[in-house]
Amino acid sequence: MADQNRAFHSKTDFSAEHRLLNDIRQALISGESAFSTTDLDLPFDPAISQIYISLFQRGLKSIRWGARRATIEATLQRIVEKLKTNPALSDFAVQDANQCRILFEMVTEERPCPLKSLTGSTFCDSRFEPGITGIKYEFKGVLRYFMPTDAVVHSIMSVSQLLRFLAKKTGIAKQSNRFSVREKLMRSEPISSSLIKSIAFISYTDREILPLYRGYPISKVRFDKETLLESTLKSIDWLVANMNDDGSFLYFYDAYQDTKVDFDHPKMADPLYNNILRHCGGTISLLRGYELTGRNDYLEAAGHSMQYLFSTLREHEWQGRYACYPFDNKKSKLGGAGVALVALMHYYRHTGDEAYRLTIDGLVRHILSRIADDGEMIGYYIHPLFNQGQPIIDPPDDIKRQLFSFYYPGEALLGLALYYQWIDRIDDDLKKEIAEKSEKALDFLVDIRPVKYKELFLELPADAWLMQATEEWVKVEGFRKNSYIDFVFNDANAMIEHSYTDENSPYLDYAGGFYYYYGDHVYHDGSRCEGLIAAYYLSTYLGEQKRADKIMAAMIASAKGLMYTRHTAESTYAHLYPEKSINSFRFKLTRQWVRVDSVQHTACFYSRLYFVM
């Protein structure tokens, strides 16, 4: 099913749509039903054009009604009549367009497609594309619609999530508590179904009508240097506004459910789950904000966030000297020590404050202790499932494999690189050991790891931390090795090759996003973009302007794509409390989940891009 609604979104005059929504609003208030439809350029077809009118208002559950009659006017009259019988309508300030938003959505295309044939992994006639396609289905004589915008309203991204949602709507979900069974039951039931597409637009204040693409007002998505800075700083402000008293950040927020309970860790709701790696990433974002603006409140907030980091630290000795590591969720991860060191080094670079020097040196020694003789970095120091939860020292290869992480070594090596370059008065022996062990580790990661752990590598690289670490180590005398440089540029090329473009995707908001396999739902990923921009900075450092230009073009496309995941006042109509999510970045195009790292990775990428854009 081709994307045929682009012409609607290229319009500049939505005055006819504005008049129509005003007429609907007035009809809901007074009961009069005179609808301005003569100037509407909508492809209404009485055979398929089901229309839904939905009302959204802060703090209220949305209400809607759908109908299909011989004309648009008759359809709207029926919808208004039914909405007025809804007892919840009286809770809505329908007369106030600044409070109550009205969404109009009309089916424009319909094609039979069995539920059992739905896929989300290839561009084909049976593809369910969240926010772009919906489902018309009939079960036990009842005709139902899952409209395209429902993917946004109900935070649905995948076919599995869609089928589980439909299982609840039909009552099939009562047959099993298991998600996988619900999905299987929906695919196996003899349900008549079709894929549908729609045109949708929504009111915004009393002045504007916003056309919706994938349920979002993409006409309001801008990208320029000013917008880049604004969105970066406002997202960092969101992190600051969502800090807890102990210095930790809000780890997760589901704007659809209005809950802070992380979906991956529902049993840890009290206290709420946290993660020291992502916490330290949030701290780095605050320091990027300080780097951009010089605002002391960012620096103060970063200092406050470190108190949470310090609360997780444990001590030990390495070679008779003080060492320390974060211990979080019953684990001590190499990456936790690494990102903690990166955060502290950024703070040190901006302040020169020696107050945390003992901790900084302790983290360095701990990281060095996790580098084996062959250069392999051990992913965990403590893990409850290994060695009875005691420190893991010199584990055999089979345990190393089980403790493998793509991300942790790069995080640790970036911390060591920043320490090596930025810290004052490093002990000569320690400095020598840092260089020797870091070189061994880089050699292992670049030359040996791809062979030893070949089966764990995927076509789309994910090791952006190691790309950043290599960018820094190449600046150090003796580390300008071709193998290191090739690793960064090869991963950057692979990311670019596994990116959607305007030419290879049928969807407007895919360009700049990544895929493992062509046809995947797009990955707009600030973390990988941090790897791309490390490659850009490295190419300019090495004087390779042609390569830098290629990477810059890819980064601009990715930066634009990430803007589609930004929560704005215009786009958060379906959120129960929009103010809680505005200025954050969500996980996916239609998934209404925000996590600290979905915000901080994007903010860090944007901040580095701002300086070179």
Image (spheres, rainbow, N blue to C red):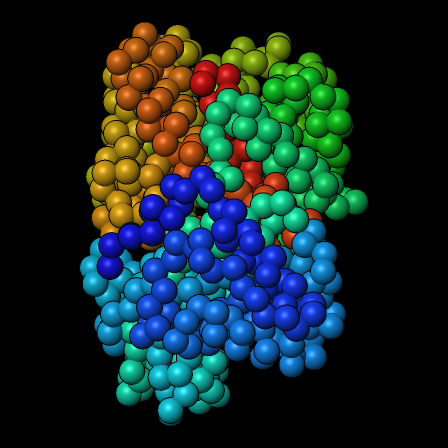
Count of numbered badges drawn on the protein: 0
Which quarter of the rendering shows the C terminus? Answer: top left
Question: Residue 329's quadrant in the figure?
Answer: bottom right
Looking at the image, which residue is at 62% across and 19% down? 291
Compared with 389, 507 (above or below) is above
In-image side of 403 versus 607 (left or right): left
Compared with 490, 267 (above or below) is below
Residue 580 image position (x, y, % from top left)? 68, 50
Residue 129 image position (x, y, % from top left)? 34, 59
In-image side of 217 versus 556 (left or right): right
Compared with 133, 85 (above or below) is below
- Residue 562 in sight here: yes
Looking at the image, which residue is at 38% across and 28% down? 555
In-image side of 287 versus 517 (left or right): right
In-image side of 246 versus 430 (left or right): right
- Residue 460 in sight here: no
Residue 473 image position (x, y, % from top left)? 41, 18
Compared with 272, 538 (above or below) is above
Question: Residue 359's quadrant in the figure?
Answer: top right
Residue 8 image position (x, y, % from top left)? 38, 48
The foreground one among 562 and 288 is 562
Which quarter of the rendering shows the N terminus? Answer: bottom left
Q: Residue furthest right?
A: 245
Looking at the image, which residue is at 55% across and 19% down? 419
